[in-house]
Image (spheres, rainbow, N blue to C red):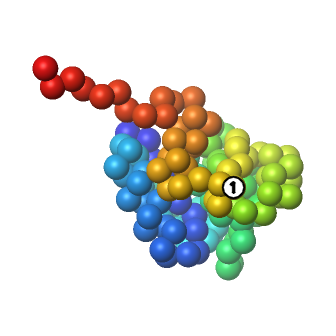
Amino acid sequence: MLKIVIVEDDPMISEIFQRKFSESGFEVFLAGDGKQALEVIKTHGINIVLSDLIMPEMGGFELTKTLRSGGYDPNIKIIIISNLIDSLENAIELGANGFLAKSAYTPTEMVGKVKELLGMPAQEPQVSQE
């Protein structure tokens, strides 16, 4: 099971994403900022970081830079979720694997887009009940 940490300072968004990603088969952890995310990553062997950009303590840019500077799994996938579209280039230059605009997708669509960026099937195959 893939482990994902959702790094988001808005509790409502975190809760919705937690539910949607859990329903899609991910083991989900939450962090309110980059510093909390680093602790979760060290403790739980996270495979995927889904991070907002603007947060208290440590934002998404600094988190991405820290994860890519060494000392962390170089294969960890980092996907930035933000409505600051102008930040796309900077996020990718720092080492993010993808960038998704929060306002462009419903939570269910966001799960599908994350799976797509990871090269996974967007939807689980339906099992026939025949």
Task: Answer yes or no: is residue 47 visible.
Answer: no
* Side of 87 relative to 44 (left or right): right
User: Which one is nearer the viewer's eye here, 17 or 67?
Assistant: 17
In the displayed structure, 49 sits above or below 122; it is below
Q: Residue furthest top?
A: 130
User: Which one is nearer the viewer's eye here, 95 or 22?
Assistant: 22
Query: Split into 4 quadrants, where in the image is the N terminus?
Result: top left
| Amino acid type for the residue under numbered disc 1 | Ala
**Few, some or many residues within 10 Å of mark 1 (<14, 14–19, 20+):** some
Where is residue 106 shown, x and y percent of the image? 53, 55
Query: Split into 4 quadrants, where in the image is the C terminus?
Result: top left
Rendered residue at 55%/50% (across/down): 110
Q: Residue furthest left?
A: 130
Rendered residue at 61%/71% (across/down): 33
User: Which one is nearer the viewer's eye here, 110 or 1?
Assistant: 110
Q: Quadrant of residue 7?
A: bottom right
* Side of 68 relative to 103 (left or right): right
Where disc 1 sits, the SS reads: loop
In the displayed structure, 69 sits above or below 8; it is above
Residue topped by disc 1: 101
In the displayed structure, 36 sits above or below 109; it is below
In the displayed structure, 52 sits above or below 55; it is above
Q: Residue furthest bottom?
A: 56
User: Which one is nearer the viewer's eye here, 59 or 117?
Assistant: 117
